[in-house]
Amino acid sequence: MSVDVNHTIQSSVGQIIRINWGLLQSFSFGFLAWVIWPDKLLSYELTQGWGWAFLGVVCILVSLASLVGSVQAMVRLYNRDKALARFMEQGSGPKSSGLASGEALDQAGMHE
């Protein structure tokens, strides 16, 4: 089994970009929820502010979902990199072998 290190690095970069995008999305929705949240939600202005409060709650839920997804992706990436490092520690790098001669085939019992 061979491991394509270049493909692994490229997929790691893609995962890191997705994680950063998710964290940016989480921050943006959290900030938007903070901005649109009505100041006097429980006062007499409740009838005017309930729509903004609902939209704020939706933004908070989206922010939390994005944050949880990003943290899960970070954990998966970390575990994959750990498993890949353990796999790479098991043996040395690939080595080339010489072309099998007729004598080597005879000694191995592979020649008729």
Image (cartoon, rainbow, N blue to C red):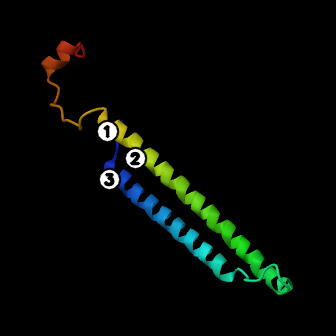
Could you say which quadrant of the image residue 49 lies in? bottom right
Q: Position of residue 112 (x, y in %)?
A: 23, 13
Q: Name the residue beneath numbered marker 2.
A: 81
Q: Nearer the viewer, residue 103 or 78?
A: 78
Left or right side of 32 for 109: left
Instruction: Look at the picture and state if 42 lies above or below 103.
Output: below
Left or right side of 7 for 30: right
Screen quadrant of the N terminus: top left
Instruction: Look at the picture and state if 98 lies above or below 30.
Output: above
Q: Position of residue 106 (x, y in %)?
A: 18, 14
Residue 14 is labelled as none
Q: In front of the other: label 3 or label 2?
A: 2
For badge 1, the amino acid type reads Met
Disc 2 secondary structure class: helix
Residue drawn at point x = 45 percent, y = 45 percent:
79
Left or right side of 24 for 50: right
Q: Position of residue 75 (x, y in %)?
A: 50, 50
Give the mark, 3 or 1, whose residue is nearer the N terminus: 3
For badge 3, the amino acid type reads Asn
Residue 88 is labelled as 1
Q: Name the residue beneath numbered marker 3.
A: 6
**For the residues marked 1 and 2, what is the alpha-carbon distance in whole angstroms?**
10 Å
Disc 3 secondary structure class: helix
